[in-house]
Amino acid sequence: MSENQEYEIMVIGDAEYKTLLTDKYKHRSPYVRPKASDVTAFIPGTIREMFVKEGDKVEKGQILLILEAMKMNNRLEAPMTGVVKQMLVKTGDIVSKNQILVVVK
Amino acid sequence: MSLRSKTNELRKRMKSAASGGGDKAIEKQTAMGKLTARERIVALLDEDSFQEYDLFVEHAAKDFDMANKYLAGDGVLTGTGTINGYPVCIYAQDFTVAGGSLGYMHARKIVKIMDHALKLRVPLIGINDSGGARIQEGVNSLAGYGEIFYRNTLASGVIPQISVILGPCAGGAVYSPALTDFVFVVDKISKMFITGPEVIKSVLGEEISMEDLGGARVHASLTGNAHFYAESEKECFDQIKTLFTYIPWNNGKKAESFQPKQPKSRTFKLGSIIPSDSKEPYDVRDVIKALADESDFFEIQAMWAQNITIGFARVNGETVGIVANQPMYLAGVLDVDSSDKAARFIRYCDSFNIPLLTLVDLPGYLPGIDQEHAGVIRHGAKLLYAYSEATVPKITVILRKAYGGGYIAMCSNHLRADFVFAWPTAEIAVMGPEGAANIIFRKEIKEAADPEKMRLEKVEEYKQKFANPYVAAAYGYIDAVIEPRETRKFIVHSLAISKNKEVRLPNKKHGIPPF
């Protein structure tokens, strides 16, 4: 069966190996470096309440919004003191894990 | 009343109790392409060998009008029988009775047959086809699951436990299969998940079908939760029957010996399967077939983490558990999934007195951010742990590459392989020649007039010096360098000589493996 396969090249230890790639390997998600200014959803859920709007000055630790997930109201805080640069969600939005919700600068 | 009339009454009662959820429900079950619970047991066990218990058990629910409801056998069949003449305890949930939902008495029946299996030291087979907890019975159905999980854990490593998923198996119910040794799934019939599509939709707004979320294919190829995938229930039962030829009844016994048979050496020639260039792929299953009796290899988890191949074969009539790097996929690297897959299999074999044969050809661990962040350190360690801990006979054959941490992990001499053989094509080194030369001769390469030419020269130099089995053999890390065609002979001899192997590990309650 191996003759008819379309082999690809995989580099390990500076050597190029001819091999098949598994679906899981091909579909692995690329690494994205988290930014300190982004407020992201650490769990999928629904935006229940928002306490700030774009342009507001915020203190580090100030509550920005309520993310409801698994029947818990999670308070999401400002990661730093600064200005709300972008509000990327609105009340009632369903958000997925790691989605960027607010950008503080 | 005469004996005759009492007998007639018994027959009447039996007929009613054995009728499941009635014609309409059975029709529905059949329309889904599914056999009934009773048909499944009959199809799986040896003819006329099923002896049923607790047929007259009735549910004990009082709330929500349940007191007036009759549920035949409370939605589950239990009993004993034989497969290929081997005794087994078995239960099968009956989806035609209240959706096979698990209530207090339903669970009591399962738990009773589990206790039997453990006490009698015979394998346990559970056929799962259930909508989940019987909500009307509240905390009692949760208690039922808990009792099942507890017994699964106690029986683990004592008797073989097999889960057959022939319908939905959702929520807490999935944890019983997860605790058992082997999970069988059938395309379009099996569905396993913790939270179903509806909950996912309401919480996340994401739509997904049951099949895409937790169908047979998903668990066989993506999650690794299933060990055997079949297209039909019949094929699934045949797989189970084959499995039983390879494993013992319990951890106090050895698997049955069969008449020794030669491999099909005309189809599978050891001398010509493996390309000499260690960067060229091949199918390691051909090597296994060249070594196995009748070239029969019973592969486990064939569709998941394909970069490592595991399964059973017989060599000279005796079952061996085989772990082999598969260069055809991901160059045969170790990664999170393949370490997990192999480690669990090694522990299975060790629990059930099945010798381990390890075939080595790997460039090492898979490099990558996703792997590091997925905890490849912890998962990779499982393999070291499992091999080190295993006290069954351990035979290792190094076919080609064995670099770095991969060399150590693949049942090396250092993890107490009993016999390590290497083919003349083996390259046992701290890393591949390319990588090693680039590091060791960095300065020479950089300063050379023609760095590329110098690099190639140095790679060749390293290859000549270290990419062979003789450096390791000189330290005694390899027991013998052998010709490929002698491999089976060496394995047969090693297995025969290890029959009475006895290793005592330090006394402990249990270890703390990295899981």
Image (tube, helix red, strand yellow):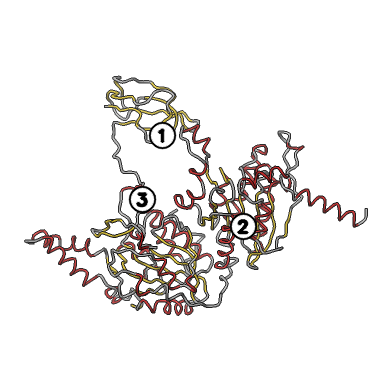
Q: State how far apart marks 2 and 1 are (Cα).
A: 39 Å
Q: Mark 3 points at which residue?
A: A25
Q: Residue at x 44, y 78 (%)?
A: B494
- SS class of the residue under badge 1? loop
Label 2 neighbour load within 10 Å: few <14, some 14-19, many 20+: many
Q: What label sits on residue A96 in the rendered view?
A: 1
Q: How far apart are marks 3 and 1 (CA)?
A: 23 Å
Q: Which chain carries label 1?
A: A
Q: Which of B396 and B317 is in front in this view?
A: B317
Q: Is residue A82 left or right of residue A63?
A: left
Q: Are marks 2 and 1 on the same chain?
A: no
Asked whether the residues under the numbered discs 2 and 3 touch, taking CB atoms below 8 Å apart as contact, a structural biologist would say no
In the image, B283 versus B219, the foreground residue is B283
Tell me which amino acid carries mark 2: Ile
Q: What is the x, y in percent for residue B443?
A: 12, 60
Between disc 3 and disc 1, whose residue precedes?
3
Mark 3 belongs to which amino acid? Tyr
Task: Sort mark 1 into few (<14), some (14-19) or many (20+) by Cα contacts within 10 Å.
Answer: some
Picture coordinates of residue B362, whole percent (x, y):
33, 63
- From this view, report whether residue B336 is shown above or below residue B24: below
| Residue B388 appears in the picture as rendered | yes
Q: In this view, does B450 lie to the left or right of B384?
A: left
In the picture of the structure, the residue carrying the numbered disc 2 is B125
